[in-house]
Amino acid sequence: MREALAGDQAAYQHLLKRHQRKIFELILKLVRNREEARDLAQETFMKAFGSLATYREEFRFSTWLHRIAANCSIDYIRKKKIEALSLDQPVQTQDSQITLEIPDWSLNPEAEWVEKERSLSIQEAIDSLPSGYKEVILFRHKDEKSYQEIAGILGIPVGTVKARIFRGRELLKKKLKAWRKKYAM
């Protein structure tokens, strides 16, 4: 590294060969285009060797070089234009114009009803569980408590919590299986 900083071309070549493959692979993961990755790798090394004077020896050279590669890739991605299709303007084809009609799926009463029924059925199934099972199921899945936290709150062993959660889930599966059969489409 010191030799490259001093202007030794052989040292530049050694650094290039040593890091070239890893830099290319990093850039390829980011831009997903081999040709662009090759160009960006070349640009990375040009920027790095052009600014070797700013490199600080307390950091690893590879880390510094990877940061330059990542920045080059991010700049490329930001500058890359994304072709967008206007939903308001007709699309011009060779023979005519086509107006796009996009369905509005934001309000679907049937799907909302099914979701509401599903939620109510799940809540009914939970409410119908024996209290010991209902309690641990709610702590675990609604309040997102750990097994240890539930054991501490209820004053029971962790093994009992695990067993109740297992049995509670099995009871819920049976109850919800009946709901699925009722509302299968």
Image: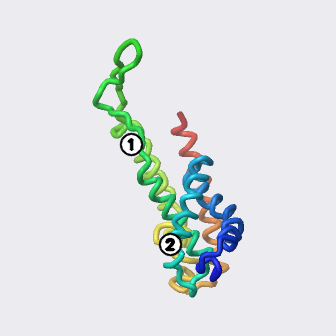
Q: Look at the numbered disc 2 and give the secondary structure of its residue.
A: loop
Tag shown at residue 112: 1
Q: Nearer the viewer, residue 45 or 166?
A: 45
Q: Nearer the viewer, mark 2 or mark 1?
A: 2
How many numbered marks have been drawn onto this rendered protein structure?
Answer: 2
**Residue 114: x, y in percent?**
44, 42
Relative to 14, does residue 38 appear above or below in the rendering?
above
Q: Quadrant of the N terminus?
A: bottom right
Q: Nearer the viewer, residue 113 or 7?
A: 7
- Under mark 2, the amino acid is Ser
Q: Nearer the viewer, residue 178 or 81?
A: 81
Relative to 135, does residue 84 appear above or below in the rendering?
above
Relative to 160, does residue 101 appear above or below in the rendering?
above
Residue shown at the point (35%, 25%) measured from the top left: 100
Q: Look at the numbered disc 1 and give the secondary structure of its residue.
A: helix
Q: Which residue is under mark 2? A: 51
* Relative to 39, 142 lies left or right: left
Q: Nearer the viewer, residue 123 or 82?
A: 82
**Residue 18: x, y in percent?**
71, 69
Instruction: Looking at this view, name the residue that lies furthest to the left.
Output: 88
The earlier-in-sequence mark between 2 and 1 is 2
**Residue 72: x, y in percent?**
50, 61
Badge 1: how crowded within 10 Å, few (<14), some, or many (20+)? Answer: few
**Residue 35: x, y in percent?**
60, 47
* Relative to 182, 62 lies left or right: right
Classify residue 62 by image quadrant: bottom right
- Under mark 1, the amino acid is Glu
Residue shown at the point (32%, 32%) measured from the top left: 87
Relative to 85, does residue 152 appear above or below in the rendering?
below
Q: CA distance from mark 2 to mark 1?
A: 59 Å
Residue shown at the point (40%, 18%) measured from the top left: 93
* Relative to 39, 74 lies left or right: left
